[in-house]
């Protein structure tokens, strides 16, 4: 089963993007399933999405895996919305386990940037959005209403200056995306290599003249956001923005 992982905060507009991806982006007539955490509230687009796809709630990573396994041949395409109340790295790592087990085949990871939230504290929130960018093949710039064009450009230029390989698309004023079909193209454009199958030896570029004198490891390096210290803590923790996003939404 082909799968797309959706990242972003609760109020970032993920479900509006989902609706457009399903209604205008998916080619042919595949059986589509959407999975969303029980911790997420109801959304205005839920009823419409339910008319186009199986709409399934999951309660935990273990429950999510069980549901996906049981979907079996009941769906051709899965849009899996990561729980915005869980640590971002944990969510991506749990999804990777399903890919590694052959339960799903990752096509793309789609990150949704809430531009209004980001612009409200660019320096303070950059760490979270940097992590979303790191894992994403495509980043959708949403919630731009009321945000200065210069602020949106500042967000975009941060990642273009860092040569982030993912593409950007704008969510338009009517909630639609610039080109939903292009987002679903089966092409990896993410910085993270966590989902890639590669030989660590290829990175060493060794030949007879460059062989190291000391022993060296050829183990595949963990993704920087997955790496853990001896005490079990993340070496590069991702900022938890769930409460910040709620407070920002309620304060508008």
Image: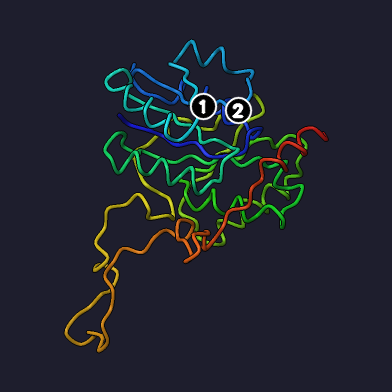
Neighbor class of circle 2 (other Cα within 10 Å; few <14, some 14-19, many 20+) is some
Residue drawn 43% across and 29% down? 63
Q: In which quarter of the view is residue 210 placed?
A: bottom left
Q: Residue furthest right?
A: 251
Residue that appears at 54% across and 35% down: 83
Give the residue drawn at x 72%, y 49%. Answer: 151
Q: Nearer the viewer, residue 154 or 117?
A: 117
Q: Secondary structure at mark 1?
A: strand
Question: In the displayed structure, does residue 38 sit left or right of residue 65?
Answer: right
- Residue furthest to the left in view is 208
Residue of label 1: 36
Q: CA distance from mark 1 to mark 2?
A: 7 Å
Q: Which numbered circle lies on residue 40?
A: 2
Q: Say above or below: 213 vs 37.
A: below
For the N terminus, the quadrant is: top left
Residue 183: x and y in percent read 45, 36
Q: Position of residue 113 (x, y in %)?
A: 61, 42
Which circle marks residue 88 in the picture?
none
Tell me whether circle 1 and circle 2 mark residues in contact (CB < 8 Å).
yes
Neighbours of disc 1 within 10 Å: few (<14), some (14-19), many (20+) = many
For residue 84, above or below residue 151: above
Which residue is at the front of the view, 124 or 235?
235
Coordinates of residue 204 in the picture (x, y in percent): 28, 73
Q: Is residue 36 depicted above or below 188 in this figure?
A: above
């Amino acid at each position: 089963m082909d799968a797309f992982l959706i990242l972003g905060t609760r109020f970032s507009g993920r479900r509006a993007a989902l609706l457009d991806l399903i209604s205008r982006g998916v080619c042919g007539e595949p059986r589509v399933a959407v999975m969303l955490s029980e911790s997420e509230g109801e959304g205005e687009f839920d009823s419409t999405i339910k008319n186009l796809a199986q709409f399934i709630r999951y309660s935990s990573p273990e429950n999510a895996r069980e549901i996906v396994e049981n979907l079996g041949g009941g769906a051709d395409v899965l849009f899996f919305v990561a729980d915005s109340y869980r640590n971002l790295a944990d969510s991506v790592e749990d999804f990777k386990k399903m890919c590694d087990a052959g339960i799903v085949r990752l096509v793309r990871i789609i990150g949704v940037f809430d531009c209004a939230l980001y612009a409200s504290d660019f320096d303070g929130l950059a760490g979270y959005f940097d992590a979303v960018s790191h894992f994403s093949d495509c980043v959708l710039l949403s919630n731009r209403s009321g945000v200065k064009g210069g602020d949106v450009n500042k967000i975009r230029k941060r990642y273009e200056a860092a040569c982030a390989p993912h593409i950007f698309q704008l969510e338009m004023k009517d909630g639609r995306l610039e080109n939903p079909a292009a987002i679903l193209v089966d092409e990896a454009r993410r910085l993270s290599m966590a989902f890639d199958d590669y030989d660590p030896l290829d990175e060493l570029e060794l030949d007879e003249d460059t062989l190291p004198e000391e022993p060296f490891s050829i183990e595949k390096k963990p993704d920087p956001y997955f790496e853990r210290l001896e005490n079990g803590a993340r070496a590069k923790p991702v900022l938890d923005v769930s409460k910040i996003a709620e407070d920002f939404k309620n304060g508008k």
